[in-house]
Structures are given as structure tokens and as C-alpha cells.
Image (cartoon, rainbow, N blue to C red):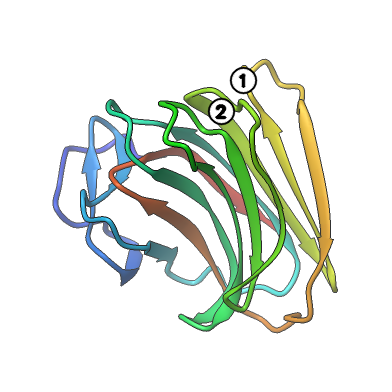
Amino acid sequence: HFDRANSTTVSGWTEQLGNWTINSNRLQSEAAGTWQSITVDGSTQANGCITARVTYPAGTTTKAAGLLARYVSQSVYIMAKLQDNSPSGYFDSYFIYSNGSIIAYGTGLNFGTDAIIQLTFAGTSVTFKVDTNRDGTFDFTYSATVTNTDLGLCGAYAYQQCYIDDWCYET
């Protein structure tokens, strides 16, 4: 999905926070230790499903990668992410957010360094799934309830140069 030349701009996407690039055919957030988000132009929907491959880059600092849905602003969105909270050198936690607040999380886990993640959202229900070994079977599933049911953009989230690839969304 990012099979294009390396670039400091990502055509068809809008940077909401931070700077994003195409690096080795993958979407990559900048190295800064700040939240970074980017959305696909024209992806506005209330209900849907987003899937992506997330890859942990080299090093052992706090890193995170995830999916955005119903993004209206920096304070109105749904997000689900994998994160290295320890830092252990692999994704060891998951978090689900609604409008800036954590509504579900788990720590002390092992999602590895290269996983497929999926976020489905319909009405007030959201489900976050993780395929840790990319074999087509989701190994972990987490569900939560949100209050944000408005239309919003779909996109990606990252922290500290994590990679996003094979990104897709559908209603």
C-alpha cells in the first residue's frame, strides 16, 4: 500500500500531528518522542474496519504504533495501539482510547516486533485484534465501549519511528 518511492511527503494523506515519511515502502513516523497521527484523505466514516501491519524499529525505547478511527480532531477520535511500555525491545502492551482517554489496556504481554492489527468500530462497540505472527489468525482480541459515534477520518498513529504497512480500511 506504500509501494512508492521514499518521500518526505505522503500523498493522499494528511499529517494531523508530527511528520511522516515513506521509508522502504512503509509509512514511518518521525523520531521525536511525541504522539504522531496521519489520516487518509476522504476516509470519513462512522463504522468500519481498519487493518495494518505494524513493525517495531531497532532500539529499546518506548515505541508505539496503531490505528485511528472517527478522527475529527486531536481531542475527538478512537485509537488502538501496540506499545513497548517497559521498554523491552518488542510491543508488550495494548491501549484503546476514546477522545483522549484510555478505555482499555493490558501490559506485560508479548506481541513481538511485527504484527497485524485490526480495529473494527460500529456504534459504541470497538474491537481491537492482534495477529502476532502474521499467519492470518488473530491471537488476541479486546473489546471496549466508546461514546464517540460521529463520522471521522481513518488513519494511523505512531511514536518513535514505528512502521505502518499493508494499511487498509473498509465500511
Percent x, y for residue 91? Answer: 52, 33
Residue drawn at x 33%, y 30% is: 60
Mark 1 lies on residue? 134
Give the mark nearest the N terminus, 1 or 2.
Answer: 2
In terms of depth relative to the viewer, which is nearer, 28 or 160? 160
Residue drawn at x 63%, y 45% is: 94
> As drawn, is 79 to the left or to the right of 49?
left
Q: Is residue 164 above or below residue 137?
A: below
Q: Which quarter shows the N terminus?
A: top left
Task: Classify mark 1: helix, strand or loop.
Answer: loop
Percent x, y for residue 169? Answer: 61, 52
How far apart marks 1 and 2 lie (CA) works out to: 6 Å
In terms of depth relative to the viewer, which is nearer, 135 or 95? 95
Crowd class of label 1 (few under 14; some 14 to 19; many from 20; radius 10 Å): some
Displayed quadrant of residue 23: top left
Mark 2 lies on residue? 115
Query: At label 1, which amino acid type do we have?
Result: Arg
Q: Are marks 1 and 2 in contact (CB under 8 Å)?
A: yes
Label for residue 34? none
Query: At label 2, which amino acid type do we have?
Result: Ala
